[in-house]
Every structure is written in C-alpha cells, then in structure tokens.
Amino acid sequence: VFPDAHMFCLWGASDVLLVAAPAGRGLELERLRGPAMEAQLRRARLSTAEDIAAFYVASGKSLRALARPAPRNTDDRPYVEYRAPRDLIEVGRAPAGENRTAVRDLPRRVVPPAGGPLAAWPREAVWRSRARAMLANADNAQAARVFEELRDAGSLSLAVTLAKEWSTRVRAERRATLVERSRSELAAGDSPAASATLEELVRLPGAPMEAWVDLAHVRRELGDVPGSGAAARTALAAGVSGAARLEALLLLGMAAQAAHASAEAFAAFREAQRLAPADPRGYDYEARMLVVAGEVAAARAVVARGLANAPGAASLLEARRALERASSDPR
C-alpha cells in the first residue's frame, strides 16, 4: 500500500517504527534544525538532528525484501492481532536491553541502503551518527567491524577518529568499574580481592592517584611493606593531595622505617605533621622511631608538639605516659 515506506528502529528499546511516506519523499535535514526543533530533540534525548540517522533501517524495495518471508496480515487472517499480545509478554519477560529476535534480524550497518529519506544528508554526518550509535555498547569484535566498514567505505579518517573516541570511552568505563569494585571490596575488608582490582586499575592510563594510596594500604595489610612504600611514592610523585596525600606520607614513612631508611621516614612523618597538624599519627610514628633510636628526650618533645596541635589525642597521651614512666624508671 505504501511502496516507499520507511523503517526506523529504536535499537535500545527494540521498538520498530514504520513510516508511510509519499513516493520519492525524503526527510529534509534543515526542517529538523532550529529553535523550534531543539525542544523536540531534547525530549527525544538526541544531541543533534543528525542523530536520527542512527535509527534508519530501510525503505522501499529493501524493506519489501526484508519483509518477504513474513506472513501477510489480512482481514481473514489477522496475524498481528493475535501475535502481538504474546510478543508483548515475551518482551516484558526478557532482560532489559536484550535484543529481540525480530530486531536482531534487522540489517544494521554504518552505511545505510542507497536512497531512502536520508539520501540528501551529508554522507559523513550520517556515517558518524550511525557508527557512534553502533559503538555505544559494542565489544571489541563489534567495534572492529564498524571500523572496517568505515575503512572499506572510503572514510579511514573517520574510522580513526571514532576508534580513538571508543577506546577512550571504554577505558573510562573500565576505570569506573574497577574504582567501584575496589571500594566495595575495601569496605568489605576483602584485601586480596581489592589488591587484584587495584593492581589492574593502576595499570590503566588515567587511573586516579588515590588508587595508589589504596593499593599502598592493601599491600601493607597483606605483608608487602616494600610494595606499600613503592605505591605511596608513586602517589606522592603524581601529586596526590589532601587526605590521600596524608595517608601516602604515613604509609611511606612506615615503609621507610621498616627498610631502615630513617632519613626518608623522618621526612615523611614531618611533612605529614605540617600537612595535618591536628592528626596525631605523624607525631606518634616519629616519636616511636626516636625511642627506638634511644633519643627519649627528642621523642618527648615531638609528643609535646603533637599534643599542642591535637589536645586530647589518645595515642599521644599514652605515649607521654609511657615516656614519663621510662624517665622515672631507674633502669
């Protein structure tokens, strides 16, 4: 009845639209631009009018060829009327985003069939829109097919541009997944699992600097003190700031102390004190080192300085009592 009808598919929702069109009628891109259409595009969650190209499937002869094997829907055999309710139930039961059989059978390529309502649109804009939509949830093999199709169609530069976009997005999504997973594992106290996740995370380009601090904590908990110090040094060299920097300094100091690198340990603890004067740990750790070195008077001075900045800190009060007992012990 409508030999030039057009098919559009909302791939994510698995809905198919059949648009009855007069013979030879195209979709004018200029009509989809301008202030009057901006609200409609936003409502449809589209960034530009060119994004519509991603949904186009086929028209005219291509569409009839696609439908040829299907049973006809007639008055005396209303196939759709009886099939549709069952399809709706099947769709409702399927996991969200899963491709249904009918949608999976539709041709989806970067280069649309010749002719159709988009024939007058700029070729590169159409290909870009369709390729980006196909890459949205693509795995490596699917992405490779998109890039190969663009290359074979004669648009290697677009293939390269989109490949960079895709790889950047995939890495960002992987980073976000690993960050979320590591947080859950750390919260659950699962240090071995958190260690594996964080080791993978820090190998990715653009990994957050704080991940190195978390890794330093986990390595120390698992008994890898030198590895903890190395991770803390990496975080500090990368310029980690705020609370994460404080943790990195304390972890580095403890690792350096264990390695008998006293100068590095003292420097780390003192920088921690300057960074967070009210945090008692920097003073406590330095005082302990001084006691081990036999410098009790210097340790008392550090504890006193710490209590001046962090009055009532339990660890420093206990350290002061211990040092007073040591001073009064004739042995």
Image (cartoon, grey):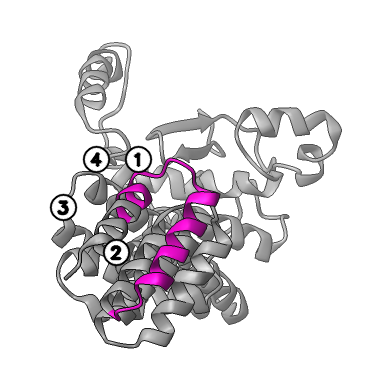
Q: Residue 170 in the image: x percent, y percent?
A: 42, 63
Q: Nearer the viewer, mark 2 or mark 4?
A: 2
Where residue 190 is drawn, which disc sits there?
3
Give the residue drawn at x 77%, y 34%.
38
Q: Is residue 244 left or right of residue 102?
A: right
Where residue 327 is drawn, which disc sits there?
2
Question: Marks 3 and 4: CB-CB under 8 Å?
Answer: no
Which secondary structure is most common in the magenta stretch?
helix
- Residue type at numbered disc 3: Asp
Position of the C terminus by quadrant: bottom left
Image quadrant of residue 144? bottom left
Q: Nearer the viewer, mark 1 or mark 2?
A: 2
Secondary structure beneath dot 2 equals helix
Q: Residue 217 in the image: x percent, y percent?
A: 29, 63
Q: Residues within 10 Å of mark 4 (few under 14, many from 20)?
A: few
Is 204 or 73 nearer to us in this picture?
204
- Residue type at numbered disc 4: Thr
Q: Which residue is mark 4?
A: 101
CA distance separating discs 4 and 1: 14 Å
Where residue 247 is drawn, which disc sits there?
none
Q: Earlier in the sequence, mark 3 or mark 1?
A: 1
Query: Which segment did they paint magenta?
Result: 293-319
Is 209 or 219 nearer to us in this picture?
219
Q: Is residue 17 above or below residue 330?
A: above
Q: Residue 189 in the image: x percent, y percent?
A: 18, 49
- Residue type at numbered disc 2: Ser
